Image: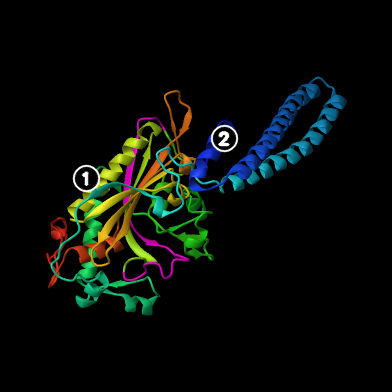
Amino acid sequence: MLEIQRLRSEKESVIEGLKKRHFDATEIVNSILSKDEQWRLEMAKLQEVSSKMNQISKQIGFLFKEGKAAEANEAKTQTSVLKTVEAELKEKVDDLQAEITELMYQLPNVPNELVKVGKSEQDNETVFEHGTEPDFGFKAIPHWEIADKFNLIDFELGVKITGAGFPVYIGKGAKLQRALIAFFLDEAEKNGYVEHQAPILVNEDSAMGTGQLPDKEGQMYYMPVDDFYLIPTGEVPLTNIYRNVILPNEDFSIKITGYTPCFRREAGSYGKDVRGLNRLHQFDKVEIVRVEHPDNSEKALNEMIDHVKGLLEKLGLQYRILRLCGGDTGFAAAMTYDFEVYSAAQDKWLEVSSVSRFDTFQSTRLKLRFKNADKKSQLCHTLNGSALALPRIVASLLENHQTENGVNIPECLHKYLNFTKI
């Protein structure tokens, strides 16, 4: 959520910045500022009435002590009237605050100055490329055929048990999943991230805190009986560890990681690259999350990008990095870099990670702050990234490391497995 102070002081730049997303915020921002002005007027009245009540309350005691009962009772009557006025003003203030908050939730984050104007993924910028297309010397086959040939993944069994998008991993397929999770977590630990095992069900406050609600309500699985949501990403529980936290000083750099299953309804995506592991409703992912001083945000983002680069290079995968345009950047992010791995058999690029900085957008909702050198509360910056999401990594490993009679396993995974080839 954007800060109200920012709208007050930078109204035009916020409206202009949101145009990068092809989002016209003029009406919403004007409405927010109009209600904010009303709120401040009513708040001033409320504070004045409350102050007057306090003064009269102090006088009542003195009047009784001095034997001036009539005057004291008259003051009590006056206090009673003011209490009614106070209650009415408090209700107005609370109603206006609720209306402002509701409108604020509709505003996405303002894109970083490096983010280009654009409508869709077609306008994203390629900023880095690594590796070359594999040269097999034979006709490469897609991962779903490899998985079927070696009994690694059973997609139809998943349909029987649950439905489409819930595959069952078997034998070496299941072991490969476990090895990748362990590898990603170990690499994160080497880079200073502290592992957490977090819940995969969250409450509404947690989903609001990281920006999944109200923006992505239709994309999450909801448990109405308990009012819980299945997480779409480990970002949600991991970042919410620091909801309503004030860090004691400005000397901090918090790095956390965790493995979680993730659940996404993927509403409206049917028919779009859904073959095999390309688009699932349940998948595994290792997430990295950082809470940083605003001055360290850019450095932290670059370190996270380098971390994901290192993982892909150790896995021997060709990849590229895209800086997303305004129209393709997620609702809560100020800037996002997508990592895509080349799928040799499908002859296309598959997104395997997004690394994003949110600046103060999440921390405003989370009330995540630190005490600066002047002992004043200041909002932290938050960042997160997939390091990595497994389905398309598995797909790319099977396709890009295939041979005529199997699949070679990258050396970095050997210590986690009792086989080096499928």
**Magenta stretch encompasses residue 256:** yes
Q: Which mark is residue 12?
A: 2
The residue to which callout 1 is attached is 190
**Which residue is more in the foreground, 224 or 393?**
393
Q: Which SS class for mark 1?
A: helix
Q: Are marks 1 and 2 in contact (CB under 8 Å)?
A: no
Q: Residue at x 43, y 48 (%)?
A: 240
**Does residue 150 sit above or below 420 in this rendering?**
below
Q: Which SS class for mark 2?
A: helix
**Which residue is more in the foreground, 206 or 148?**
148
Q: Residue at x 47, y 60 (%)?
A: 229
Q: Nearer the observer, disc 1 or disc 2?
A: 2
Q: Position of residue 277 (x, y in %)?
A: 31, 67
Residue 371 seen: yes
**At label 2, which amino acid type do we have?**
Glu
**At label 1, which amino acid type do we have?**
Lys
**Which residue is more in the foreground, 195 or 29?**
29
Residue range in magenta is: 248-276
| Occupied quadrant, residue 100 | top right
Q: Earlier in the sequence, mark 1 or mark 2?
A: 2
**Magenta stretch encompasses residue 348:** no
**Does residue 5 sit above or below 373 in this rendering?**
below
* Predominant SS along the magenta part: loop
